[in-house]
């Protein structure tokens, strides 16, 4: 092209520059503009005492289960970001289980109803509150005018406090019968038996006051009753070491409680009563052993031990068919051996369990619904369409009710069948109270403004009542809060004074309305006569419970403490049974009972009888949100069978198991469940303890020049002594390691460290969820979180089948013994997280200094500097580094782990890590720095035990202690000197900051003296 | 270049196949003109060549698309299965670095050792080296979580005063690989200069002629130039020789410096170097055997040369075999349960198939090379070379993956299965390598013209009295221009 042409036809240079310049300006302006304008701080005019960026803490009450634990909700700039236990609360004493912590994900659940919903043309569509109120009033009026009010049914998720009585009053004001207080996850059989024997629904079990605990399928650590206080008491009892009680677990499957037991009597399902009779002497041991299919000598040993132990505590669970006699026998045993008043404390009863209706009430309501006898069905919180066994036909019966109203705040299987949804506030958004122990009210206050356009059901009821001339006078109070304040001693001032603590002396309003008598109980078949090859053991999932946790990704991703499976329903089978049937892990089988069938992969589990299979409930929802679709519903298999007090007998049938062909990868976090001589989780028989004191002095060893130093503390290399390869323990040494103690940063005087007492740890995994919450760890197992183009492994558990879970702390579960498939095996749980090695293998291999050693002993990961070579993970013997395989924190990606509004839960102190970087436990560095800054602002030194990490804070067995190992006044330094202390992989000279205290084994007195 | 050769009598021909390799004879090559004509004839593109290039570029595009997808979506699209944090990419990186060893070994070390058989294959091997290292160099970047930050591994001045961690073997890698790439590329180019001059002189196309002229650096074939050239060549050969040993030693440090059972062992540097040479020879055979057929240069790359290369392969195979045995012994002798159980798992556990494949390909099959018939059977040699390539890829796989999958922490033991992205990028790397190689063989002579001429007896107008043409003698003519003698 010649120059003339350029000038005549082509673009002139000037024009070109104009276009380019304009384009750049447009591109730049587009780049700068955000899609929507957001407020940086949600408050324009901040309420008093709210400082942007500084947390406010609200004491409130947990509604995750019936126990009503106390919560501290940490709220930053108007958003609740973390739930912790209330240390002043009489029930949970500062600890909090995984289920409770995950209430945050109910608050911010992306599948919450965002406004009232009205069914139009068969579909629920969003509506305005006025419209919804109008419809509800109309329908109420219709029902009443037709005289159907007495046939209305109100099912409420059971909760402690004044609301149930308030609700009953409202119902009676409208001429309706008292509500059914339903909780599928609670053992109503046990409640009935406790009430009969001890006069309270749930006494406190004081494990410290007993020598022997015999549990007949009572999973007191994982869901049988209030787990948190029971775990606290259990851990305290076991921490006595030499005087600790032994636990004998009787049942067909070892649950978490079963795995914590010292002895397992693996009796056939339904024959537990024979063991109880053997204990009471009503039945010869040999006959009992014959009946339950266990070894007579093992049973004899337990019987002998029981006779010698005073007091012994006998607990029994009621989910097995025919549990009524078992529970009665257990009560009789407790009466006989003097456990009542010592180990069983009815005077410290947990009142949260009072007033729960038996599922039989609901089944009776189903019969009425089917016959057209129910005019109006109202459901609040409960999800009976899922949690009642399919054989009861709840969902089908609902179709026969003319009008159904749901007060559920989150989409669930029941609310999706209703005609009108009046979404309730989440418990963290509304007022309420509970009476967890006698004479103490646990207050429930909103920790933040409602996330969505919901209304507290109590206020809805008040507004409806105000709209009715007949009741308007009675409901003069402006809202439920003022009604509640009027009940508190001292009124508004009393309330204001009590709220910071969260508890106040007082009693909740008692329910007085007449409740229907227990209907006739459905016949319980004898399990032995049902057809099938293997006993079917259905149990409530330890964290998802009866399905309530299913739409919370933290809980779906949290490995089941026993099976270590996530996002998946499996059929647990004994390895020898599987061998006989030609099955292996992950092979698909079809389980068929008289009630239904289910296809799921096999998981080989040592802790189950060879003639039994087990399936957990909680998963496989039809319509309860995006995450709840994972897995299968075990309730499909449960035939209608009730026990004497009207509780569902989950274990009531045999099932036939057939190979389905094909397999499904297990979404498990378990590698090998054996230690392979690695000595990771160590134990010491109680007899070999030295009295809990410091280390025994070991004979002087020959010391070679250049050899790893042994002279600091015999047997245990103190984490402070050997930080960063220096010889801090040796005052004569010139080797000060990487940082001189007089480092300019003034940080090298500290050595952050941690002890984990394996004698206390129960393996409940509350620490794992606490870590997810504190450190913004993404959940990665939803099926859309895998690769999108040609995904090679689809379905829920997508990334977990490739071990890509991100849990910074994990609970390892190792078996000892039982290689031959026998029931006589021991389980050791060990939480494993970054060990913050003094001589860290990960540090020198990082080419870009993304991981380095801080002067205060922390092994620091700089996300911004990480390029993702992953060499650090390869070189980490503990395998505690986790890589961001996808952009889990990027909203436009399918892998996004925090779909709106789940992102509101994120801790503002912690970065959401980007794609392609490594992350790991930071020992909650944000808390360390926060505490340091606070101390500096207040011009004081850090106080010993002033703060702790998220895992230690939540731990319901108080196994984790965090602190400064270089300062004698912190409790961690005392624990490090315990004779049980050891480092994992000490032989690698990593000089870890995490010190484990050996588990203490309590061998049966009848057994041979155990070898070390 | 200055391989010391002596002319041979025609009668001896190829009677003694096991002759010392310095005595290379090309009885079918009569004169310089023939060398120039036949070798430059290979430079004409053919349809088959275009098809081959098309296939190579297609593979490259597949790999490039897979990488793009991986960069956009994240490394999760590859088959990583923690704790197996390194997989196919690192395996392939070490594989290509290994391939890249044969070239320099042949052109530098064998040059210093005066191994005559190198003359006919070294150009090809050296080009292979450069392209293999270019391929290998992609993988450390490709396997990064954030590949766009790869330059953070390079020590460059910045106002934050952040320097790379010099203790990290990955930094040593950066230096080792870059140095090796620079030196081997320089070595290849320097060796090409006299040949480029010949191409320049014969070229008719003015543009190509101009390019060759630039590349030939004004080579006039003078005595002085040759003197400098030979010095430079010798210097570079001496310079490259320690690099051959150091590069793969450094690469092996990536593993040996860690504490992973199966990696943490002092035998790795020599073991890796031997393995690298072995795989390089395997790849040379894979390339040379079809090439000598397609390019009609069987009378240059004679069966004797292949025989000698096969002997080298056999020797390195035995060295590698001893290294394997040493690993087993040390695992047993260490008394460390982690080490012992890892090796048991590698041999009889979940990775039995990979290790059996490796031992079959790398130790058992090459034993056939003890037979002269096998060494001189090009079909078998070609098949065997493919097995060696596969075996050496799996050797790295067995080192990288099973070690990581079975470390100290039994709770974190896992498996590993690559995805289509891994395979696509692996294919892409072959496409990338082949593309460069195919482009090379049609632009530059795959046989060093000038070096071949050193072996070929010049046809003299007048015989020297002794019948020996020793360059030191003042002859009445200067062999400046090829084809001058008649």
Image (tube, coloured by chain):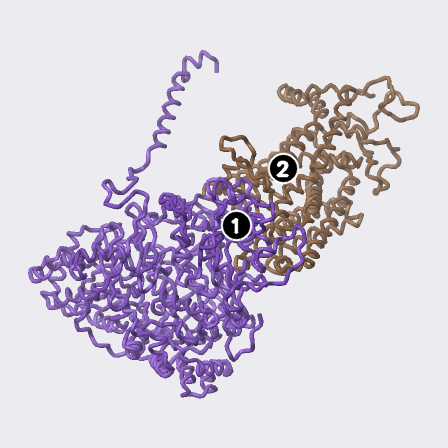
Q: Chain of mark 1?
A: B
- Residues marked 2 and 1, same chain: yes
Identify whether A4 is placed above or below B64.
above
Chain drawn in brown? B
Question: Which-is-in-front pick, marks 2 and 1?
Answer: 2
Residue B334, by quadrant, is bottom right
Residue pointed to by mark 2: B177
Q: Position of residue B400 (x, y in %)?
A: 60, 50
Marks 2/1 in contact by CB < 8 Å: the verdict is: no
Q: Which element type, helix, strand or loop, lies under badge 1? A: loop
- Identify the residue shown where x is 69% and y is 19%: B218
Q: Is residue A625 left or right of residue A1010?
A: left
Structural distance between the alpha carbons of marks 2 and 1:
25 Å
Residue pointed to by mark 1: B80
Q: Position of residue B185 (x, y in %)?
A: 66, 31
Q: Looking at the image, which residue sits at the far right?
A: B465
Image colour assigned to chain A: purple
Identify whether B74 is placed above or below A418.
above
Q: Is residue B478 left or right of residue A959?
A: right
Q: Is residue A738 visible?
A: yes
- Identify the residue shown where x is 37% and y is 44%: A939
Q: Position of residue A112 (x, y in %)?
A: 28, 53
Determine crowd level at label 2: few under 14, some 14-19, many 20+ residues with C-alpha closer than 10 A: many
Q: Which element type, helix, strand or loop, lies under badge 2? A: helix
Q: Quadrant of the C terminus of chain A?
A: bottom right
- Residue nearest the viewer, comparing A283 with B277: A283
Q: Chain of mark 2?
A: B
Q: Position of residue A719 (x, y in %)?
A: 53, 53
Determine crowd level at label 1: few under 14, some 14-19, many 20+ residues with C-alpha closer than 10 A: many
């Amino acid at each position: 092209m010649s120059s003339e042409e350029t000038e005549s036809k082509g673009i002139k240079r000037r024009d070109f520059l104009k276009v380019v310049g304009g384009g750049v300006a447009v591109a730049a302006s587009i780049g700068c503009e955000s899609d929507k304008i957001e407020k940086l701080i949600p408050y324009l005019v901040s309420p008093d005492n709210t400082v942007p960026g500084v947390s406010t803490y609200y004491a409130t009450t947990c509604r995750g289960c019936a126990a009503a634990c106390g919560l501290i909700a940490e709220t930053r700039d108007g958003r609740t970001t973390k739930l912790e236990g209330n240390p002043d609360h009489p029930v949970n004493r500062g600890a909090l289980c995984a289920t409770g912590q995950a209430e945050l994900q109910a608050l911010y659940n992306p599948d919450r109803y965002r406004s009232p919903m009205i069914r139009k043309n068969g579909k629920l569509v969003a509506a305005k509150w006025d419209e919804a109120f109008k419809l509800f009033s109309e329908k109420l009026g219709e029902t009443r005018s037709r005289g159907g009010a007495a046939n209305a049914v109100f099912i409420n998720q059971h909760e402690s406090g004044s609301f149930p009585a308030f609700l009953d009053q409202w119902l009676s004001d409208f001429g309706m019968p008292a509500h059914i207080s339903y909780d599928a996850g609670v053992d109503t059989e046990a409640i009935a038996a406790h009430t009969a024997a001890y006069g309270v629904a749930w006494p406190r079990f004081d494990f410290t006051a007993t020598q022997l605990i015999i549990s007949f399928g009572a999973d007191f650590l994982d869901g049988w009753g209030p787990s948190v206080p029971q775990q606290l008491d259990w851990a305290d009892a076991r921490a006595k070491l030499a005087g600790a009680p032994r636990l004998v677990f009787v049942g067909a499957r070892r649950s978490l409680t079963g795995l914590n037991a010292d002895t397992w009597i693996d009796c056939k399902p339904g024959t537990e009563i024979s063991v109880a009779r053997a204990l009471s002497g009503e039945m010869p041991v040999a006959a009992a052993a014959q009946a339950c299919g266990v070894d007579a000598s093992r049973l004899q040993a337990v019987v002998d031990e029981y006779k010698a132990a005073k007091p012994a505590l006998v607990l029994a669970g009621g989910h097995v068919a025919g549990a009524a006699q078992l529970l009665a026998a257990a009560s009789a045993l407790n009466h006989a051996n003097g456990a009542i008043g010592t180990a069983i404390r009815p005077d410290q009863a947990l009142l949260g369990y009072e007033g729960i209706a038996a599922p039989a009430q609901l089944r009776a309501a189903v019969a009425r619904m089917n016959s057209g006898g129910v005019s109006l069905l109202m459901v609040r919180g409960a999800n009976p369409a899922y949690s009642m066994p399919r054989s009861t036909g709840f969902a089908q019966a609902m179709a026969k009710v003319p009008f159904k109203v749901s007060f559920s705040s989150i989409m669930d299987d029941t609310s999706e069948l209703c005609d009108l949804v009046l979404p309730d506030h989440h418990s963290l958004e509304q007022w309420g109270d509970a009476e967890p122990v006698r004479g103490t009210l646990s207050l429930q206050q909103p920790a933040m403004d409602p996330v969505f356009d919901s209304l507290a059901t109590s206020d809805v009821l008040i507004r409806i009542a105000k709209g009715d001339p007949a009741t308007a006078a009675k409901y003069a109070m402006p809202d439920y809060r003022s009604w509640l304040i009027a009940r508190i001693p001292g009124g508004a001032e009393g309330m204001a004074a009590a709220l910071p603590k969260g508890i106040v002396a007082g009693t909740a309003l008692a329910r007085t309305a007449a409740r229907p008598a227990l209907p006739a109980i459905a016949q319980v078949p004898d399990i032995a006569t049902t057809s099938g090859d293997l006993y079917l053991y259905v149990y409530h999932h330890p964290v998802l419970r009866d399905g309530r946790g299913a739409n919370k990704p933290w809980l779906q991703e949290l490995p089941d403490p026993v099976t270590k499976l996530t996002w998946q329903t499996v059929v647990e089978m004994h390895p020898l049974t599987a061998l006989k049937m030609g099955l292996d892990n992950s092979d698909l089988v079809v389980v068929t009972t008289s009630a239904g069938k289910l296809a799921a992969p096999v998981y080989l589990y040592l802790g189950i009888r060879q003639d039994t299979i087990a399936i957990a409930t909680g998963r496989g929802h039809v319509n309860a949100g995006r995450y709840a679709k994972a897995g299968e519903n075990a309730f499909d298999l449960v035939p209608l069978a009730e026990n004497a007090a009207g509780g569902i007998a989950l274990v009531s049938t045999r099932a036939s198991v057939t190979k389905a062909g094909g397999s499904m990868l297990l979404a498990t976090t378990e590698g090998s469940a054996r230690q392979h001589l690695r000595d990771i989780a160590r134990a010491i028989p109680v007899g070999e303890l030295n009295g809990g004191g410091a280390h025994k002095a070991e004979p002087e060893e020959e010391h070679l020049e250049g050899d790893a130093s042994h002279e600091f503390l015999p047997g245990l290399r103190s984490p402070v002594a050997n930080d960063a390869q220096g010889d801090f323990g040796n005052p004569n040494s010139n080797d000060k390691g990487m940082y001189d103690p007089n480092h300019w940063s003034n940080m090298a005087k500290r050595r952050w460290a941690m002890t984990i007492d394996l004698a206390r740890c129960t393996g409940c995994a509350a620490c794992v969820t606490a870590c997810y919450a504190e450190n913004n760890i993404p959940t990665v197992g939803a099926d859309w979180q895998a690769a999108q183009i040609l995904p090679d492994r689809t379905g829920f558990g997508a990334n977990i089948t490739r071990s890509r879970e991100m849990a910074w702390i994990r609970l390892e579960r190792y078996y000892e013994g039982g290689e031959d498939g026998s029931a006589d095996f021991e389980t050791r749980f060990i939480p494993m997280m970054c060990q913050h090695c003094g001589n860290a293998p990960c540090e020198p291999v990082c080419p870009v200094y993304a991981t380095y050693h801080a002067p205060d002993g922390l092994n620091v990961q700089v996300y911004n500097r990480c390029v993702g070579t992953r060499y650090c993970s390869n070189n980490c013997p503990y395998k505690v580094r986790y890589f961001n395989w996808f952009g889990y924190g990027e909203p436009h990606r399918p892998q996004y782990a925090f779909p709106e509004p789940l992102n509101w839960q994120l801790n503002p102190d912690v970065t959401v890590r980007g794609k392609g970087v490594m992350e790991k436990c930071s020992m909650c560095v944000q808390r360390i720095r926060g505490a340091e800054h606070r101390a500096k602002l207040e011009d004081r030194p850090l106080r010993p035990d002033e703060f702790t990490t998220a895992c230690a804070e939540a731990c319901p067995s108080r196994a984790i202690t965090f602190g400064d190992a270089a300062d004698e006044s912190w409790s961690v330094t005392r624990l490090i000197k315990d004779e049980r202390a050891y480092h994992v992989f000490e032989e690698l000279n990593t000089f870890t900051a995490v010190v484990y205290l050996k588990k203490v084994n309590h061998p049966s007195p009848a057994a041979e003296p155990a070898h070390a | 270049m200055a391989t010391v050769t002596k002319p041979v009598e025609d009668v001896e021909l190829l009677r003694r196949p096991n002759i010392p390799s310095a005595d290379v004879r090309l009885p079918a090559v009569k004169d310089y003109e023939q060398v120039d004509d036949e070798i430059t004839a290979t430079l004409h593109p053919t349809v088959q060549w275009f098809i081959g290039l098309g296939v190579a570029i297609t593979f490259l595009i597949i790999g490039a698309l897979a990488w793009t997808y991986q960069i956009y979506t994240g490394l999760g699209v590859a088959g990583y299965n923690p704790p197996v944090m390194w997989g196919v990419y690192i395996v392939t990186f070490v594989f290509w670095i290994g391939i890249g060893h044969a070239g320099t070994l042949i052109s530098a070390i064998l040059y210093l050792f005066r191994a005559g058989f190198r003359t006919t294959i070294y150009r090809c091997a050296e080009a292979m080296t450069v392209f293999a290292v270019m391929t290998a160099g992609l993988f450390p970047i490709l396997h990064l979580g954030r590949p766009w930050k790869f330059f953070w591994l390079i020590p460059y001045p910045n106002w934050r005063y952040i320097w790379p961690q010099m203790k990290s073997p990955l930094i040593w890698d950066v230096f080792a690989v870059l140095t090796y790439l620079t030196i081997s590329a320089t070595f290849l180019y320097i060796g090409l200069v006299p040949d480029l001059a010949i191409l320049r002189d014969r070229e008719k196309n003015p543009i190509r002629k101009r390019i060759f002229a630039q590349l030939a650096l004004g080579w006039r074939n003078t005595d002085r130039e040759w003197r400098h050239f030979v010095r430079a060549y010798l210097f570079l050969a001496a310079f490259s020789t320690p690099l051959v040993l150091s590069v793969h030693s450094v690469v092996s440090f990536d593993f040996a410096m860690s504490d992973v059972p199966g990696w943490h062992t002092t035998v790795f540097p020599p073991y890796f170097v031997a393995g690298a040479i072995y795989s390089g020879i395997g790849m040379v055979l894979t390339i040379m055997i079809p090439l000598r057929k397609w390019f009609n240069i069987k009378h240059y790359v004679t069966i004797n040369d292949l025989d000698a290369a096969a002997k080298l392969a056999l020797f390195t195979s035995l060295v590698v075999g001893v290294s394997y045995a040493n690993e087993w012994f040390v695992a047993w002798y260490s008394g460390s349960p982690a080490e012992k159980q890892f090796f048991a798992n590698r041999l009889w556990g979940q990775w039995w198939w990979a290790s059996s494949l490796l031992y079959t390909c790398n130790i058992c099959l090459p034993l056939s090379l003890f037979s002269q018939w096998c060494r001189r059977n090009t079909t078998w040699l070609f098949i065997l070379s493919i097995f060696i390539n596969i075996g050496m890829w799996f050797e790295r796989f067995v080192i990288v993956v099973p070690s990581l999958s079975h470390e100290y922490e039994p709770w974190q033991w896992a498996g590993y299965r690559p995805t289509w992205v891994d395979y696509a990028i692996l294919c892409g790397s072959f496409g990338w390598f082949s593309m460069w190689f195919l482009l090379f063989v049609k632009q530059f002579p795959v046989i060093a013209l000038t070096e071949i001429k050193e072996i070929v007896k010049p046809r003299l107008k007048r015989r020297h009295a002794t019948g020996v043409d020793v360059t030191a003698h003042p002859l009445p003519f200067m062999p400046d221009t090829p084809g001058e003698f008649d």
